[in-house]
Structure formats: C-alpha cells, structure tokens
Amino acid sequence: MSRLNPKGVITWLKGLNRRTIVIFAIAVVGLITLLGVSANSAGLSIEPEDGTGASSLRQSSSSASNGEYIQFTEAQPGEGLDFPANSVSQQSSVSQWGITWSFDKPYSVGKYANGDWWVVGPITLSGISPAQGNGTNGANINPTKGQVGYDKDIGTFQSLSFPRTVQPGSSIVKGISRPGGPFLSDTSHRGELQTAAVLTVVSEPPPKNGAIAFRPAYFGSNKKQYLTTDLRVNLLPDIDPPPAHKREPTQYGYSYYVRDLEYTANRFQRLQLDHATGDELNRRTHPVDNMRDYGGRFAVDINDAVMRLMLDDPMSEKAQTIINLVQYGIDLNEMFKAGAYICADSAYNCGGHGGGRGLALLFAATLLNASDIKNTLDVKQDGIPENYTLNYFNAQVPVYGDKACSESEYWGRYNSGTASGAKTCRDPYGWIDGGWSPGASYQGVVTPNWRGTAAFMYLVPESQNFWPSTQRDKLLQYMDRATDFGAWTLPDPTNRRPEYAAYHGRILYINSNAYISPLTESLWIDQNLSQRITTDWANL
C-alpha cells in the first residue's frame, strides 16, 4: 500500500471549513486509536534515526554544539519547537569559539537552544582567555550603549579584573582581537575583532536545561526569557523552490539563489555583536567570524536566511536557522530599546549601514508573537531605514530620501557630483526620489533588500500586524513601484533638475546591484508578489 502524502492531506484540509476539520480530526484520532496505527506508519512524522522515537538534526562541526546530535520533535500546526532536555554538568571552565571562561571551582553549566553557554551562579570568575592586554581581547558584563571597546581600535577599551564575583542576570561578553589592526581601510572587512562570544550567569537552569530556551539578550540588564516552544512555526509557508532566475556571479559570491540551510544556520550561529552606534564604529565592532561588517551585505544574509525558511523543507532542517535568527532579534530588541543601534546618534540614515535589522526584528516578533518587540518596531522607527526614508511629501507615491537633510546639503551633493555632500538626502521639495542620482547610487544600496521585508509581509501575512501601521503601506507601495517601474522623477514642478526627467522609470539596481538577495529576487518573481498592488505607475 502506498504511503499517505502529508502535503496532499494539508492541501485538502485547507479547503474544508473549521467545523468539518474538527469532525475529521476526531474521526482520525479514533480510528488510529482503534487500529493501533502509529503516526510513523502513515508517513506523518520524521523517521527516527537513533531508536529513541525522535528524529535528529545534525549540527556541522563549526556549530555551537560541536557536531553533537540534537533531538527534535517535528512541530505540528500551532506548536513551537520542542526538544528533549539538555544535559547539565559540573565544570570549572567552559569554552566556545576559542574563548574560555574559567571558574574557581566546578559549577552547573549547560547550553541554550542556540548553543551558547549558561552557568548557575553566583560564580567566581578567575579569568577569561585569551588574556586581555595592550588594548586587545577586551571583555564586559551586560554591555550598555557606548560600551564597545573590545579592542583599542574600536573605542574606550573594556577590560575586567580577576578574580571577580559575577551575579545571576549577567552576560559576560568577550572578544578576540584581530591581529594586525587597525583595519579601517580593509575593503573585505573592517572589523577589529576576529570573534566574540557570551556566557550567561543564571540563578537556576533554564527550562529543559536550556534545550527550549533562548539565551537572554547579551545587551543590558533585562534578561527576559523566551522559549522555542512559543515559536509559531506553523506561520511559515511551504513554497516549492522557485526556478533559478539566472544571475551572474558577483564579487561577493552571490551566484546561486538558494542558500543551504546549514549555511544559513551557521551564518547566524555566533554572537551578532551589533550594539555600537554610528556607521563606521558599528562596522568595526562586527567580528570577522561572526557577521559581515557592512549593512548592505549584512542585509543580504538576513534576506537569504528568512526567504530560505519560506521553502518546502522539513521543520527539523529549518529549526536551527529559525532559532539563530530569532536569537538575533531578541538581542536587537534590547539594543533598540536602549537606543544602542547603528543610526541612533546619526542625523542621517547611515547610508547602507542600517540594513537588515528591521526584518530581523519583524521575524522574531512575528514568530514569538512578542508584543514588546512589536512595541520596539513602533517606537524606534528612526533605527529602521524602511520606515524613516520613505514619505509621501508632495508626490503621489512614497519617495526615497533621508528627511533629516537640509536643502543646502542636498544641493551640495547635486552640484558636486562627487563625494562631497550627503548621499542619501531626500528631495527638499518632496516631489522625486532623493539622492544625487535617482534609481542608482545609494538608493541602489539602501533599498533593494527592503524587498525581503515586503516579501515576508506578503508570504507571512500575520507579520503585517507587527510592522508600524503608518509605514506598512508606504513600504509595500515603494517596493512594488521600485521593482516594476523604477525611479520616480516626474512630475517635478521645480524644473531645477531637468536631466533627472530621463531617470523616470529607471531600474538600474534591481538586476545588477550586489546588495540584493538572489533568493528574494526569485521568490518575488515566482510568487507574483508585484501583482499584489495593481497601481499603474507609468500612468499615475
């Protein structure tokens, strides 16, 4: 007898009303009970690999679990990600990513769902290696805004004295300096750190010894506990992989449109050290082994990972990417609440530096149904480029540009045509897209990856409830217009930029700019997301 196709069953069920589904479910449960048929024999769960009745998710050797197996229970609709309890051991030190925290005696230790360590305290910390010295390999506890000096070339050097007592509710962050700095002129990565990691001191073991617990945010003193069992993974669609829309290889290696799930999990596995304010300072704080330095490239990785989770893969294979992305969103939430985000102290939108954070927050808020993260998205809009660089002004459509710029700054860039003046200024008269070359320049760096945020809103409609309602329509309209039509330069009643008329409808960056996620591009086309808005932009 052929095995039951679960995907076909789900498709059939979607066509039924709720009452019929309930009656059907009761009948199925009764039949299974009567016949003693297991779910496995019907092909409705993952086949066990180790004889325990649960499937296994294999971590790569570079992941936090060091190649160990994590037992995983396949999530059903409405359920989160559940795991058997982690082990707890007594250890006098713990190590991760080349960093070792040493104690005066053995303490109870374990790991969170993302692989980071916790230890039951209070503890006496006798040292952290590699040792700090000469302004390198810095460390801090519960870092706050402005405390980013894990290397002398980043800011005021942060160091700790030992031995020291560390109380529960503490996150001990340690960096390893990159040898040979400073790297301000390094075109591949300007980060001054090689890696960074965090150890969290708790008063008692987290739920299931950390197996279902997210690490509390490393930033600040609020250590709110979120659980993987609260993740609404049933909201994620199961889309067949789209056909590869041909894309030439670029200098950044984005030559193929689907990232491997192991890649996306590993990409966000390590601590995303992201609480420095100011564009270049933030960039130099990002550890080389942990994250990209520049926001434009960083946003591509976030787009790739979120869109990869839209595809038709077993939840057991998606789980670690989901956990690692949500963990980043939890960290970001505390940074944003304290005003410790990249553009917090900048008069401008930081060019391409601020990308990706809005989507990371939205992803975490949606899956956790987290009202506090939703509130952060509402009140900290100045940290999210998708929000503060789109406005209607005098135009009939949302136009791009930083509203903080003055009229003189706008014309300074326009008149020079070179590096002087602000690159992202809005049209001071509110008629056309800003920047010194509408449809290109920084508009092509800053805005293409907003399409990932828009695509997530379309593919996971529940997410629209977590984005600021005053900004949602602006974003969706802009991405539709920018993708299907292009730059907006007409009408321009000022008649002060006549050459810009030729740029009306120019689509320069959509298929040629390196700062774009190929998978997002493919899904946008394959799922006909541009058809959600029917405005005839050319004849508006």
Image: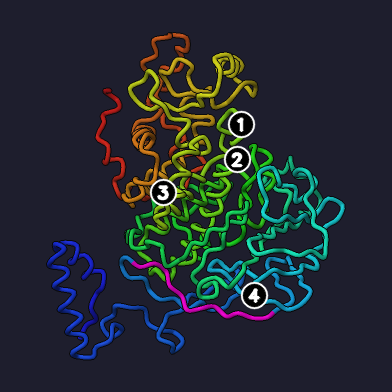
Q: As displayed, is residue 406 above or below residue 138? A: above
Q: CA distance from mark 4 to mark 1?
A: 41 Å
> Which-is-in-front pick, marks 2 and 3?
2
Residue 342 disc label = 2
The amino acid type, in three-letter code, at marker 1 is Ser
- Looking at the image, tell me whether mark 2 or mark 3 is earlier in sequence order: 2
Residue 400: image x %, image y %?
45, 28
Note whether 495 is above or below 480 in the view shown.
Answer: above
Q: Secondary structure at mark 3?
A: helix
Check if residue 83 falls in the magenta segment: yes
Answer yes or no: do the residues labelled 1 and 2 have beta carbons within 8 Å?
yes
Q: Which mark is residue 144?
A: none
Q: Which residues are magenta?
A: 79-90
In this rendering, is residue 263 above or below 414?
below
Q: Earlier in the sequence, mark 4 or mark 2?
A: 4
The numbered mark at residue 346 is 1
Label 4 packing within 10 angstroms: few (<14), some (14-19), many (20+) = many
- The Cα atoms of the two marked residues, 2 and 3, are separated by 24 Å
Q: Which residue is mark 4?
A: 109
Q: Which residue is mark 3?
A: 520
- The answer, for residue 313, to whether it is visible in the render is yes
- Residue positioned 76% across, 69% down in the render: 124
